Image (cartoon, rainbow, N blue to C red):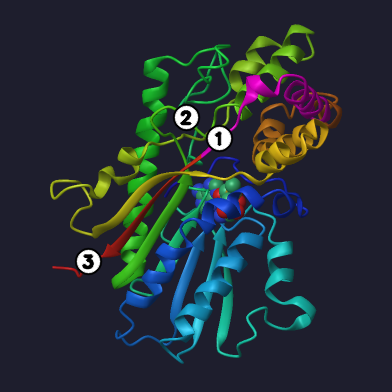
Amino acid sequence: MAKSVLTGMVGHGFYNQNSATQMAAIDDVLPWLESACASVDLTESAAAIRLADFGCSEGRNSVAVMRHLAACLRQRTSAPIQTIHSDLPTNDYSELFALLRPEGRSVFDDPQVYSAVVGGSMYDRLLPSHSLHMAFTFNAIAFLSRRPLERLGDYIFPNGPSALSGVGSVSREERAAFADQARADLEGFMRARAAELLPGGKLLIEVFGAGETLRTCDGIYDALNDAILEIVEEGQIDRDAYARYYQPVYMRTLDELTAPVADRNAPLAGLFQLDRAETYEVAVPFVEEFRKTGDIGKYARDYTNFFRAFTEAVLRGSLSQHPRLDDLVQEIYARAERLVGTHPERYEFHYIAIAALLTRKADD
Ligand SMILES: C[S@@+](CC[C@H](N)C(=O)[O-])C[C@H]1O[C@@H](n2cnc3c(N)ncnc32)[C@H](O)[C@@H]1O
């Protein structure tokens, strides 16, 4: 069984309010899912057509996708549809429940669409065998199931600093430990979904990652790293605490994402056929807005809230022994916001997404 590290988002609606960028990344692959809806095999007898989203967080984006796909499937079938929204047991599900039943009624405006929420790690089996027609995960599979190293001495992110920054480093050996963990997690996820999907079922994996030159980690982790180093230099935390904190997340390349199914000798080639795979750059709403308005204050705030939503829980967990934890965390993000506002060119941000669409093969 995969053990999950503390990888949750900031709850209480903060993730929902700061995830328009993730929705933009999803929008780019929605046409892939629309054609999957048009071609997925619905002939297998099942009580319902089941769709599952793994790593749904507080649910704003997950519910939007499910609404879209339920409407697509309705053009082909009048069978009941079940949407399944899954995330870690520690996830804050309160907004998701409210979104699924606003004013006590289903958000789907369709009496034959039902929803369920499942808490558990996506690297484990979570659903009955052969129960799903479609499964997907967005902006989530980069979060590792465990911390492969206890310390990362000279930077806070496994892929290392951006070429622009040059502050800090991650050795080849350190990076390899994370790449190995990411490979094992991806294969675990694919095996679990292979068991849950019906033959002919579709699996879409979309996640932020690394392109040939740009990586989604560039800029955001440089800003957070520089802010934390200021705190270290002032003696508010020591160098050992800095080394013990890192984000257990790994930015894969498209080749790493497709490796388990890339050719006939690949380890999971017997389970899935690879239909389509791409690397693409997402138009980031807060970057686009800054280009239009030049409002640097708003840009720095939106930029910082964007990465705060998915880094704060881990940072807090790592510094939890600090006597002034709330103030310290607040100060770190305030410093990051100041740095982005003062040197936007140093923390340039690009959202590079990688995605693959797979079809579950029939068992031999
Ligand atoms: C950046 S959010 C993405 C949320 C949503 N899919 C979206 O695109 O807006 C990443 C989500 O992955 C979840 N996550 C991380 N590790 C996970 C695991 N092992 N199993 C299930 N979910 C996980 C986190 O709790 C978080 O809610």
98 part of magenta stretch: no
x, y percentage for residue 252? 40, 36
Is residue 155 visible to us here? Answer: yes
How packed mark 2 is, by other alpha carbons closer than 10 Å (few <14, some 14-19, many 20 or more), is some
As helix, strand or loop, the secondary structure at mark 1 comes to loop
Q: Nearer the viewer, mark 2 or mark 3?
A: 2
Q: Are marks 1 and 2 in contact (CB under 8 Å)?
A: yes
Sooner in the amino-acid sequence: mark 1 or mark 2: 2
Instruction: Specify the amino acid type for callout 1.
Output: His
Residue at mark 1: 350
Q: Is residue 124 left or right of residue 112?
A: left
Q: Residue at x 48, y 31 (%)?
A: 215
Name the residue tied to disc 2.
Answer: 214
- Determine whether the residue tagged by mark 3 lies in a helix, strand or loop: loop
Residue visible at 47% across and 54% down?
122
Q: Nearer the viewer, residue 335 or 323?
A: 335
